[in-house]
Image (cartoon, rainbow, N blue to C red):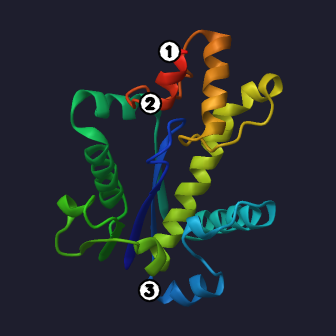
Amino acid sequence: MDQLGIDEAGRGPLLGPMVLAGLCIDKSDLPLFKALEVQDSKLFAKNATTLKRRAALAAKLKADFQHQIIVVDAIEIDHFVASGPGLNVLEQIKAQELIQALPAQEVILDGATLFRPLIRPGVKAINHADRDFFVVAGASILAKETRDQQLAKLLEPFQAEYGPIAGGGYANGQTLKFVRWYLRQKGELPPFYRKSYNWKALEDQKKD
């Protein structure tokens, strides 16, 4: 394989996993990626039509190209954050696992500062690589689609009682509302809540 792109989804949320994806392509495949309009997953609008298109693209990439996806759950994230190495080191370790699993002549990682420790001949770390390189954009689609599916599975058991759970697990009012409801119902935080993160909004609510 000529080129390996690596990107992540779910670094910032408080609920659910972080997902890293690696996608390998030959440079001869780049016209196909252009024809498919592969782009950074963040550029897909959050509506049913575009999300369906993103899901179809993810399925095609999985079917046609060598790839690997790593799901890092909240427990592992909490361990690295609480014990000292931190989220950056965890993400670097997982990216290195993808590099080893998917050998390529050229590796492109999204994040110049984050992945600087991994830079060496044949390995580049570039800001906004998911916007400038089709292979990284493809990896971002795989990571984001997987992250959304994983979070949906975690939330599904509670929707019959709670109703639709919005917010994507990020630190916003909708996520806060769900976490507060879960605390009232269960007397504890959800098992997929990143307990190592000090969410001030939630702590303030606990004091009320």
Helix, strand or loop at mark 2 = helix
Dot 3, how many residues are within 10 Å of its Cα: few (below 14), some (14-19), or many (20+)?
A: few
Q: Given this view, does label 3 or label 2 mark the residue nearer the observer?
A: 2
Residue at image mark 2:
200
Q: CA distance from mark 3 to mark 2?
A: 46 Å
Residue 31 versus residue 101 in the image, above or below: below
Q: What amino acid type is highlighted by mark number 2?
A: Lys
Say the numbered circle drawn on residue 207: 1
Query: Pointers 3 and 2 in contact (CB under 8 A)?
Result: no
Foreground residue among 123 and 79: 79
Query: Pointers 1 and 3 in contact (CB under 8 A)?
Result: no
Q: What amino acid type is highlighted by mark number 3?
A: Lys
Instruction: Please name the residue shown 28% across and 55% down the image.
Output: 96
Say the numbered circle drawn on residue 192: none
Foreground residue among 172 and 51: 172
Q: Left or right: where does residue 7 sit relative to residue 164?
A: left
Residue 118 versus residue 108 in the image, above or below: above
Q: Left or right: where does residue 200 sit relative to residue 168?
A: left
Residue 17 versus residue 121 in the image, above or below: above
Residue at image mark 3:
27
| Quarter of the image where one finds residue 33 | bottom right
Q: Quadrant of the N terminus?
A: bottom left
Q: Say which label, 1 or 3, has the lower sequence index.
A: 3
Residue 99 in picture, x, y percent from top left: 32, 60
Helix, strand or loop at mark 1 = helix
Q: CA distance from mark 1 to mark 3?
A: 56 Å
Dot 1, how many residues are within 10 Å of its Cα: few (below 14), some (14-19), or many (20+)?
A: few
Q: Say which label, 3 or 2, has the lower sequence index.
A: 3
Dot 2, how many residues are within 10 Å of its Cα: few (below 14), some (14-19), or many (20+)?
A: few
Q: Given this view, does label 1 or label 3 mark the residue nearer the observer?
A: 1
